[in-house]
Image (spheres, rainbow, N blue to C red):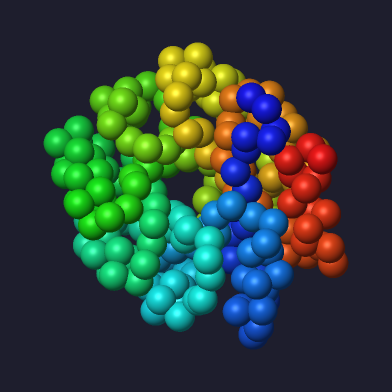
Amino acid sequence: MSPSNVLIAPSILSADFRVLQEEVKSVEPYADWLQADIMDGHFVPNLSFGAPVIKWIETSLPVDVHLMVTNPADRIEEFLDAGAKHITFHAEVVESSEKRRELIKRIRDGGATAGIALNPDTPLSSVDDVLGDVNLLLIMSVNPGFGGQEFIEDVLSKARKAREQHTDLMIQMDGGIDDKTASQCIEAGANNLVSGSYIFRSADRAAAIAALRGQ
């Protein structure tokens, strides 16, 4: 995978919400997507923000919504209405193939692309039923719920296997992504990297994003 073909999605969870619009504008010229981590305090122990924040943000970047919630079926429309261009739900909370396909269809019918996410301990085989249907596979490289965690290297083998099995699939990795771990993810086959703390804690967001691309 060539670093030049890798999409970078800054996660606004790590931005300064007191000046959120300014934070978004600081990464907009250099990033490809903008990611919003939606946490419900149930599926993950943390609570973040909801669809009104997505609707409020002004950006030219496609907004990628990562639903870390126990009831994604109840939340799809509110994020579509808020302008999400991509919505990912977790395999761990939607285990039925039929229900997964229903969600994928609803997301696409609403004008967005659809993804499915795996926690670090969830095997790739658990989503064999829909990998041919989704636009994106999100492989979590930390346990979801909090930013700034250490990268879990064991998940790289999952990315390699997914890339071998699905050569055209968009593989996103999220968690502990910095200038060092990004190259490992790209080598393993990822072509979409989510980074929050590394980007938003940097004084030079352009340089941080370029470093993720290996430039």
- Total tally of numbered discs in the picture: 0
- Could you tell me if residue 37 is visible in this image? no
Instruction: Kindly indicate the quadrant of the structure image that contains residue 203.
Output: bottom right
Q: Could you say where residue 126 lies in the image, as x and y percent from the top left? A: 34, 27
Q: Is residue 43 left or right of residue 173?
A: left
Relative vertical location of residue 68 with respect to residue 172 in this rendering, above or below = below
Q: Is residue 56 left or right of residue 159?
A: left
Q: Could you say where residue 54 lies in the image, as x and y percent from the top left? A: 44, 72
Q: Residue furthest bottom?
A: 18
Picture quarter with the C terminus: top right
Nearer to us in this view, 25 or 156:
25
Instruction: Kindly indicate the quadrant of the structure image that contains residue 102.
Output: top left
Nearer to us in this view, 213 or 51:
213
Q: Residue furthest top?
A: 164
Q: Is residue 179 left or right of residue 14?
A: right
The residue that appears at 74% across and 32% down in the rendered structure is 183
Q: Is residue 29 left or right of residue 66?
A: right
The residue that appears at 65% across and 72% down in the rendered structure is 25
The residue that appears at 64% across and 64% down in the rendered structure is 28
Relative vertical location of residue 56 with respect to residue 204 in this rendering, above or below = below
Picture quarter with the N terminus: top right
The residue that appears at 20% across and 45% down in the rendered structure is 105
- Could you tell me if residue 202 is visible in this image? yes
Q: Could you say where residue 108 lies in the image, as x and y percent from the top left? A: 25, 48
Q: Could you say where residue 160 lies in the image, as x and y percent from the top left? A: 57, 20
